Image (cartoon, rainbow, N blue to C red):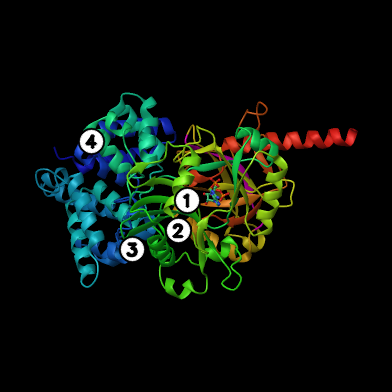
């Protein structure tokens, strides 16, 4: 049964207006109930604002503003100038298209052509399949003559669409269909519709963690049922969502948490790489699961030569090294390799080494549920170690002193600190989860606040004086995975360089909203709201209680949340998504540790 695209357009309209996540969930449940199983994958991708998972490395739509206006002007039979002017006035091309279409329909109605408004494209109207397939064709049109093909296809689609449908098609094409729907909410709605209850979300989540393709997971669920998802295994070529670490800064506490003994490795300051191999084919996925294979042709060669298994998924950290000395170089140096073009020019200037620390799949065997020593053993077996391709430096220890010594050595060697990992029987690979099986112990930044935090921008404030009329400060939030919301922590106005400030307006522009985004929880009202998307590293003097901020509200004291005193911007973290930000729970733990430290100091002073 084909699905009418108008159902999607109507849902988008409702989603745009929601102010609470529970309401968003209800609309998604309603939508999925109306979605035939064979198009559920397409609906999920569109909700995510994409045509396919980013890691597929397939082309993007490749339709710029100009081409969109041209296509719309053909479809609507108005001049490009008229359209441009209206778009400028309304601040959105989608709205301009909708308005012109509505006016034309009204005119038609006036001359008695009622059918035009009701059914703009013949008897059926646009279907989801037709819209999706046409958009996919537009994306796939590459090379000579592709511009004309894109133009024709898009104009055809916009002509057939109703005013509302056309608005959302235009926004999708522009990459501005930001509905603020997170993966967690989509999964919860799928669980309600296909699993019978929201509690089934963890089965869907586990499957998604092993194969990071929510459209595909939704389709398996809708067509084969929840049981099929329970047996899903990793597949070479489809990224696994990475396992993540908790943090502590006390060696004895770290060992205690890990059961007394741990594998302690250097925490390299580079880019995490999930390397997949099948025969001669290699894929490299980033921490955010982008396909970064093309950025590291040197790593591709290493993997081809030095992974001896025919099929494998391994993980390591790619680090820039000094070509002269082989010493580790800082993260910022490696980031210069994050580019689309001219990569070959940087290969010799910024050579890299890969320090491997995981093997989650080898020759048909899923190792995610096996303990770390077993995975490590397999890793050692399947790789051939070289100067620039080797296991992460590590020791097994049960002594806090030894751990501390190793930590200092790691810092001295240019690492960020250490990663301590559980090696007991239950030390499985927790895909997509931040847990206590891995604990990071990072360098003290020589300030009272012992560690930086990664916070998400949820709002912005205009500056004063010299910065008048431009953004001068940001409202930052932590992520709360339980409620899938972003809770305000602090307003950051210092630490930015002039260059950072210059770039702010452009960086924020695509994410600015005129009302509070649904997943944002903040009592402080910024000058403009910002859809959670951008992550920045922030440090401050100390964690403090605040009556305004909603992070951990009421956890320590009624009527107060946790905030940061004198927060400073350190750097952007383009390698992190909003859900990768520091969580409310982590901030709470940090706050408790701070209290403990202060108490210890006071006791020491009294003694
Ligand atoms: P951070 O901002 O501290 O890099 P993160 O949120 O990216 O943290 P965490 O799970 O907290 O990720 O820390 C682990 C990260 O450290 C990994 O994602 C990986 O990129 C990096 N790393 C470096 N060395 C190792 C190692 N030996 N084992 C695991 N991860 C390592």
Q: Earlier in the sequence, mark 1 or mark 3?
A: 3
Q: Is residue 429 left or right of residue 86?
A: right
* Distance from the alpha carbon under mark 1 to that under mark 4: 47 Å
Circles 2 and 4: CB atoms closer than 8 Å: no
* Distance from the alpha carbon under mark 2 to that under mark 4: 49 Å
Q: Residue at x 54, y 38 (%)?
A: 423
Say which element carries label 1: helix
Q: Residue at x 63, y 28 (%)?
A: 555
* Distance from the alpha carbon under mark 2 to that under mark 3: 49 Å
Mark 2 lies on residue: 384
Q: Is residue 589 magenta?
A: no
Judged by depth in the image, the label closer to the viewer, 2 or 3, is 2
Neighbor class of circle 4 (other Cα within 10 Å; few <14, some 14-19, many 20+) is: many
Circles 1 and 4: CB atoms closer than 8 Å: no
Circle count: 4
* Distance from the alpha carbon under mark 1 to that under mark 2: 8 Å
The response on whether ligand 1 sits within 8 Å of label 1 is no
Mark 3 lies on residue: 65
423 or 479: which is nearer to us? 423
Q: Earlier in the sequence, mark 3 or mark 4?
A: 4
Q: Is residue 139 above or below residue 444?
A: below
Neighbor class of circle 2 (other Cα within 10 Å; few <14, some 14-19, many 20+) is: some
Mark 4 lies on residue: 35
Mark 1 lies on residue: 380
The span picked out in magenta is 484-495
Q: Residue at x 66, y 57 (%)?
A: 495
The quarter in which the C terminus is drawn is: top right
In the rendered image, is residue 494 in sight? Answer: no
Say which element carries label 3: helix
Judged by depth in the image, the label closer to the viewer, 1 or 3, is 1
């Amino acid at each position: 049964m084909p699905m009418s695209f108008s159902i999607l357009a109507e849902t988008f309209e409702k989603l745009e207006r929601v102010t609470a996540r529970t309401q968003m969930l209800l609309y998604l449940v309603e939508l999925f109930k109306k979605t035939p199983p064979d198009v559920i994958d397409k609906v999920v991708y569109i909700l995510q604002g994409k045509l396919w998972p980013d890691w597929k490395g397939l082309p993007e739509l490749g339709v710029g503003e100009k081409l969109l206006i041209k296509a719309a002007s053909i479809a609507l039979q108005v001049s490009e100038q008229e359209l441009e002017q209206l778009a400028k006035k309304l601040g959105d091309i989608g709205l301009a298209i909708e308005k012109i279409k509505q006016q034309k329909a009204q005119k038609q109605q006036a001359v008695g052509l009622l059918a035009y408004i009701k059914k703009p494209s013949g008897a059926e109207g646009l279907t989801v399949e037709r819209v999706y397939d046409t958009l996919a064709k537009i994306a796939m049109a590459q090379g000579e003559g592709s511009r004309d093909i894109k133009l024709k296809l898009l104009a055809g689609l916009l002509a057939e669409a109703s005013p509302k449908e056309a608005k959302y098609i235009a926004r999708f094409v522009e990459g501005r269909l930001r509905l603020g729907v997170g993966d967690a909410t989509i999964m919860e709605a799928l669980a309600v519709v296909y699993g019978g209850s929201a509690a089934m979300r963890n089965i869907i989540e586990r499957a998604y963690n092993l194969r990071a393709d929510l459209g595909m997971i939704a389709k398996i669920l809708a067509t084969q049922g929840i049981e099929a998802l329970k047996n899903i295994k990793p597949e070479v070529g489809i990224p696994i969502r990475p396992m993540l670490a908790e943090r502590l800064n006390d060696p004895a506490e770290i060992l205690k948490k890990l059961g007394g003994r741990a594998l302690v490795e250097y925490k390299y300051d580079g880019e995490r790489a999930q390397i997949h191999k099948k025969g001669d084919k290699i894929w490299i996925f980033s921490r955010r699961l982008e396909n970064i294979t093309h950025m590291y042709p040197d790593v591709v060669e290493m993997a081809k030569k030095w992974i001896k298994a025919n099929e494998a998924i391994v993980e390591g950290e790619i680090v820039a090294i000094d070509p002269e000395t082989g010493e580790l170089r800082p993260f910022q140096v490696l980031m210069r390799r994050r580019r689309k073009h001219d990569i070959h020019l940087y290969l010799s200037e910024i050579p890299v080494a890969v320090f491997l620390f995981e093997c989650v799949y080898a020759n048909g065997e899923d190792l995610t549920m096996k303990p770390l020593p077993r995975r490590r053993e397999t890793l050692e077996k399947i790789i051939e170690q070289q100067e620039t391709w080797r296991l992460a430096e590590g020791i097994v220890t049960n002594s806090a002193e030894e751990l501390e010594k190793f930590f200092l050595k790691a810092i001295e060697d240019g690492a960020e600190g250490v990663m301590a990992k559980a090696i007991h029987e239950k030390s499985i690979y927790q895909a997509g989860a931040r847990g206590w099986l891995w604990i990071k112990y990072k360098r003290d930044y020589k300030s009272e606040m012992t560690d930086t935090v990664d916070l998400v921008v949820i709002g912005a404030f205009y500056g004063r004086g010299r910065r008048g009329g431009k953004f001068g400060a940001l409202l930052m939030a932590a992520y709360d995975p339980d409620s899938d919301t972003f809770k305000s922590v602090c307003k950051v106005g210092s630490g930015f360089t002039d260059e950072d400030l210059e770039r702010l307006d452009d960086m924020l522009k695509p994410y600015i909203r005129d009302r509070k985004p649904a997943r944002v929880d903040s009592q402080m009202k910024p000058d403009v709201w910002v859809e959670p998307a951008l992550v920045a590293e922030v440090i401050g003097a100390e964690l403090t209680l605040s009556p305004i901020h909603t992070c951990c509200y009421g956890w320590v004291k009624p009527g107060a949340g946790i905030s940061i005193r004198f927060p400073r911007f350190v750097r952007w973290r383009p390698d992190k998504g909003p859900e990768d930000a520091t969580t409310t729970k982590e901030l709470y733990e940090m706050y408790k540790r701070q209290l403990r430290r202060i108490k210890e100091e006071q006791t020491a002073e009294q003694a």
